Image (spheres, rainbow, N blue to C red):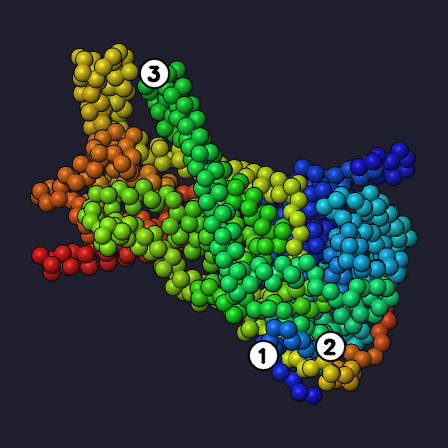
């Protein structure tokens, strides 16, 4: 699977997230907003001064700086398959009801 | 709100039902809150943090309700004390009991992202109602969402609302009351509300392990709630982890690391695993719930963005919008502020005509009325700025302006969100600092607050005009196109901005260290702003300013008035005033006119003497050694001390010290003459070009504005930061003025 950094995609291109680097606040926030492995991201447009960039992910438009988009790895949609996700993410889950 | 006639729903207790509202930003949460709470809203701060606490009262079917508006958030993963507030409110770990019911507000058009927070809230085990807001927009977009399926999947009631159109409120209220009754029935039979776990078994097992460990470690009961333990596990370096470690021991960190290691071995890496598990579950839910989503046609927002954030057009439009905003504020607030000034002057005259000169009249006219005026004069600017902010934010443009300006602000280590507050500060730092509430990141917000007072506000202009008018030669270059005075004015106005960049950089590296500022921001869909919401926000900001800052500003003006009046015997002054007022002056040339002019001169001299001997004046003398290196004498020292309430006061103070009466302004011929003629005891002229530049530089950088300091105290919720601002700005101002004077003198000596 050929991956590139999200920051290297050009407006109009799109990709599928394969990994988000880091464990800090930024990585956590990116993932909460939907940038998790398997999510499709479209690059919409750049700001007039070249940075930051608008992306569409999970139906919402978010903007981030290139430095932030650099920690997200993406691959082409054609190259992505469910098999690339960790085992624990592939099996089906069920709603667990825990009585307090 | 329709009243239900049945008396069965009336509660036995008088305690209002606590209902918390939580949701992502841009879900219309505030609109919904305002609509549900009406005008009965109270705002304050949560103790110890800068998060605004908004509560409102309502009455639903005879049940008194206390609504709690929580700050908009994408998740419950607190990484700062500000973010911890939400978790504290929901888990009841803060100063208040946990809410009885929580309403999760979602943007129906972006359900996938919004359900992330819902799945987290469901793990707390609070009676929950999910509210799909912006339902009208979802219908317009031809999204087909099955409410029944969503309710079944989540196990909680789901209602749809359109807050702007005020529809669906009744159903929402009914659902909340019903959920409350369900939870009451459950607790009557000894059960608590079910926790819905999205996290899989391995994670749950680790939570159980950690719970066992914490019981042995004597962790307080309140911190042992499963939700907090899961947060400590899933947010490395987060606030919950830190809090539990503090309450127990650092050994907990080892427990957490071991647990995270075991999860990683099962390819559940923290923190990625949480988001992946949740979004996978959400994907399964939505497969059943969303039955039709329209083909991805270019939305109106997308087409508007193509123009409004266009490389050239977008920038032009942004500049035009900012110009429009600030020129409108200028246009409308100037006459309004003048009107307030005028009515205060009128009020003063009325008091003066009723009371004879004496301490009471002096207190009322020079202390109380001037103090009230000093507060009210800000209101037009604050209201207008917040009107624009509300409109620009609600329609979605503010996020675009921040998006376009981010690159510029990044130079100072800030983000695009600081752009508007700093722009506003060029008019006045008070509304500018209030506007920093749009900045989510705490460190960015504090740095912006601390550099905002460096922007050249309109109160500095009188000082600049007086000094340039007096001592900068009236010559111009390029055939009169480029007057030297205008160049000096421009340079001195830009000085604060230029200094602010390194200051922000240093603050970012010292007091506000940490991960560099980020610009992860959602760009909401464009929509028409609501008149009701806009009116609410303008009203709230005005009220907050008058109630919380106004009182302090008022108190300070009284204190400064007293410091400028006492100690000293004012009898001679009051006699002179009485005599002047008793004279019937028909013409300036008649006997009475001549006498009045004579008496006025005596009065001015008396005023100057009183000021010099007052606490303020003595302080001016006291600090003379400090201001000598700036080329100033004690009179300028008094001016600086007396202008502590507001920079522009220096003009009037100089008028008093140089015995001209306090009614002078920067255009006053007498003041110009007096300043130009002022000398040191040895006869050298006091003012020259280097001295006047050093005065301007000082006023460009100093913090002589009580209102700004008071508003910093309000917005940072601590006296530490206004004190810090005052100290750092005064030091900067002194160094700047020192350099200006010394270099100026060297150049003067060289050239002569």
Q: Position of residue B363 (x, y in %)?
A: 38, 26
Q: Position of residue B202 (x, y in %)?
A: 79, 76
User: Do badges 2 and 3 share one subunit?
Assistant: no
Q: Earlier in the sequence, mark 1 or mark 2?
A: 1
User: Do badges 3 and 1 share one subunit?
Assistant: no
Residue under mark 1: which chain is it in? A
Residue linked to disc 3: B356
Q: Is residue B91 above or below residue A13?
A: above
Task: Give the camera-side residue of B541 and B307.
Answer: B307
Q: Give the Cα distance between marks 3 and 1.
A: 78 Å
Q: Nearer the viewer, mark 3 or mark 1?
A: 1
The structure residue drawn at horizontal position 41% and vertical position 37%, both measured from the top left corner, is B556
Task: Give the camera-side residue of B501 and B523.
Answer: B523
Residue B41 falls in image quadrant: top right
Q: Is residue B441 visible?
A: no
Q: Nearer the viewer, mark 2 or mark 3?
A: 2
Check contact, mark 1 vs mark 2: CB within 8 A. Answer: no
Q: Position of residue B34 (x, y in %)?
A: 69, 43
Secondary structure of residue under mark 3: loop
Residue under mark 3: which chain is it in? B
* Residue B460 located left or right of residue B82: left
Secondary structure of residue under mark 1: helix
Q: Nearer the viewer, mark 1 or mark 2?
A: 1
* Residue B258 located left or right of residue B591: right
Q: Position of residue B31 (x, y in %)?
A: 69, 46
Residue linked to disc 1: A8
Q: Is residue B106 above or below residue B577?
A: below
Furthest residue in direction bottom, as rendered: A1
Residue linked to disc 2: A38
The N terminus of chain B sits in image quarter = top right
Q: Is residue B683 visible?
A: yes
């Amino acid at each position: 699977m050929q991956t590139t950094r999200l920051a290297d995609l050009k407006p109009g291109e799109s990709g599928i997230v394969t990994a988000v680097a880091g464990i800090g606040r930024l990585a956590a926030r990116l993932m909460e907003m939907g940038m998790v492995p398997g999510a499709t991201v479209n690059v919409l447009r750049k700001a007039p001064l070249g940075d930051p960039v608008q992306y569409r992910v999970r139906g919402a438009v978010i903007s981030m700086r290139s430095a932030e988009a650099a920690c997200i790895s993406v691959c082409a949609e054609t190259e992505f398959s469910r098999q690339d996700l960790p085992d624990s993410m592939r099996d089906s889950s069920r709603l667990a009801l825990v009585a307090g | 709100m329709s009243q239900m006639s049945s008396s069965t729903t009336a509660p036995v207790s008088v305690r209002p039902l606590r209902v918390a509202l939580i949701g992502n930003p841009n879900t219309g949460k505030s609109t919904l809150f305002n609509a549900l709470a009406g005008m009965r809203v109270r705002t304050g701060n949560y103790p110890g943090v800068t998060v605004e606490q908004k509560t409102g009262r309502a009455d639903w079917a005879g049940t008194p309700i206390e609504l709690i508006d929580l700050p908009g958030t994408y998740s419950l993963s607190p990484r700062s004390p500000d973010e911890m507030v939400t978790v504290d409110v929901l888990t009841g770990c803060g100063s208040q009991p946990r809410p009885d019911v929580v309403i999760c507000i979602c943007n129906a058009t972006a359900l996938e992202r919004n359900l992330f927070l819902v799945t987290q809230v469901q793990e707390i085990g609070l009676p929950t109602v999910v509210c799909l807001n912006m339902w009208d927009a979802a219908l317009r977009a031809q999204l087909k969402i099955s409410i029944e399926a969503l309710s079944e999947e989540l196990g909680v009631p789901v209602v749809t609302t359109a807050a702007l159109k005020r529809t669906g409120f009744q159903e929402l209220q009914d659902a909340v009351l019903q959920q409350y009754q369900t939870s009451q029935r459950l607790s009557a039979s000894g059960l608590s509300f079910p926790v819905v776990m999205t996290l899989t078994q391995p994670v749950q097992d680790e939570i159980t392990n950690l719970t066992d460990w914490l019981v042995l470690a004597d962790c307080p009961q309140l911190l042992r709630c499963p939700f907090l333990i899961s947060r400590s596990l899933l947010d490395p370096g987060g606030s919950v982890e830190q809090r539990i470690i503090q309450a127990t021991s650092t050994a907990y960190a080892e427990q957490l690391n071991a647990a995270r290691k075991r999860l990683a071995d099962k390819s559940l890496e923290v923190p990625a695993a949480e988001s992946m598990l949740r979004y996978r579950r959400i994907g399964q839910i939505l497969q059943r719930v969303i039955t039709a989503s329209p083909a991805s046609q270019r939305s109106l927002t997308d087409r508007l963005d193509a123009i409004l954030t266009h490389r050239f057009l977008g920038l032009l439009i942004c500049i035009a919008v900012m110009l429009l905003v600030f020129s409108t504020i200028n246009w409308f607030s100037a006459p309004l502020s003048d009107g307030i000034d005028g009515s205060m002057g009128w009020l003063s005259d009325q008091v003066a005509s009723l009371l004879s000169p004496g301490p009471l009249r002096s207190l009322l006219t020079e202390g109380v009325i001037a103090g009230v005026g000093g507060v009210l004069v800000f209101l037009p600017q604050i209201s207008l700025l917040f009107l624009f902010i509300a409109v620009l934010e609600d329609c979605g443009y503010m996020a675009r302006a921040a998006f376009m300006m981010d690159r510029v602000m990044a130079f100072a280590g800030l983000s695009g969100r600081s752009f508007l507050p700093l722009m506003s500060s060029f008019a006045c730092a008070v509304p500018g600092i209030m506007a920093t509430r749009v900045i989510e990141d705490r460190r960015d917000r504090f740095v912006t607050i601390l550099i905002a007072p460096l922007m050249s506000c309109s109160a500095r202009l009188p000082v600049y005009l007086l000094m340039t008018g007096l001592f900068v030669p009236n010559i111009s270059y390029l055939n009169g196109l480029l007057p030297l005075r205008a160049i000096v004015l421009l340079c001195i106005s830009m000085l604060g901005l230029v200094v602010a960049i390194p200051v922000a950089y240093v603050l970012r590296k010292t007091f506000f260290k940490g991960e560099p500022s980020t610009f992860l921001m959602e760009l909401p869909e464009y929509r028409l702003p609501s008149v009701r919401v806009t009116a609410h926000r303008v009203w709230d900001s005005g009220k907050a300013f008058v109630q919380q800052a106004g009182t302090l500003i008022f108190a300070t003006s009284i204190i400064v008035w007293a410091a400028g009046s006492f100690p000293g015997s004012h009898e001679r002054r009051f006699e002179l005033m009485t005599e002047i007022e008793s004279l019937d002056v028909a013409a300036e040339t008649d006997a009475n006119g001549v006498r009045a002019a004579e008496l006025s001169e005596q009065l001015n001299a008396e005023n100057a003497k009183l000021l010099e001997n007052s606490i303020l004046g003595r302080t001016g003398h006291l600090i003379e050694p400090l201001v000598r290196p700036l080329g100033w004498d004690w009179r300028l020292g008094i001016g600086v001390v007396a202008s502590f309430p507001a920079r522009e006061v220096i003009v009037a103070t100089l008028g008093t010290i140089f015995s001209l009466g306090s009614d002078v302004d920067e255009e006053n011929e007498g003041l110009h003459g007096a300043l130009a003629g002022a000398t040191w005891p040895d006869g050298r002229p006091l003012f020259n070009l280097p001295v006047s530049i050093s005065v301007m530089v000082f006023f460009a950088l100093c913090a002589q504005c009580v209102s700004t300091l008071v508003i910093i105290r309000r917005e940072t919720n601590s006296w530490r930061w206004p004190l810090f601002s005052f100290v750092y700005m005064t030091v900067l101002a002194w160094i700047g003025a020192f350099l200006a004077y010394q270099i100026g003198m060297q150049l003067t000596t060289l050239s002569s």
